[in-house]
Amino acid sequence: MQRRKGTCISIQWEMTFARPRFGTDDVADQGRMLARVSELIDSRERRGTLSGAIGPIDAVHRRSANRRLESGTTIGKPALAGW
């Protein structure tokens, strides 16, 4: 008899800026957290997830970004400029 381990799936969703959007009582904490993260990145104690800027937003650069992400080897987040 073959036994199989049960599968457990969980979906987690966290929305950035949920506090300001929904006007929660602790909305000021969002600003404090972002300021602290900014300090840590500026002091180089922590690094952001940006892995590199690819170029301006156009079809060629968008396809390049998608190819990188679809490769499954991308570390961090590629960015397109010009928003």
Image (cartoon, rainbow, N blue to C red):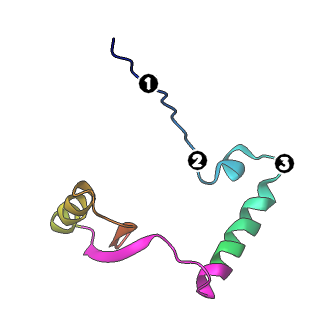
Q: CA distance from mark 1 to mark 2?
A: 32 Å
Residue 8 spot, x, y in % from top left: 49, 28
Please say whether residue 31 is one of the residues in the magenta stretch.
Answer: no
Which residue corresponds to the image point at 33% horizontal and 77% vertical from the top-left?
53
Residue 76 placement, left or right of 44: left
Q: CA distance from mark 3 to mark 2?
A: 17 Å
Q: How crowded is the residue under tag 1: few (<14 C-alpha within 10 Å), some, or many (20+)? A: few
Q: Splitting the image into 4 quarters, where does residue 79 fall? A: bottom left
**Which amino acid is tagged 1?**
Lys
Q: Secondary structure at mark 2?
A: loop
**Which amino acid is tagged 2?**
Met
Q: Nearer the viewer, mark 3 or mark 2?
A: 2
Q: Splitting the image into 4 quarters, where does residue 40 fall? A: bottom right
Residue 47 spot, x, y in % from top left: 53, 77
Residue 24 spot, x, y in % from top left: 78, 46
On screen, 46 above or below 18? below
Q: Nearer the viewer, mark 1 or mark 2?
A: 1
Residue 27 placement, left or right of 3: right
**Which amino acid is tagged 3?**
Asp
User: What span is colored magenta in the figure?
Assistant: 39-57
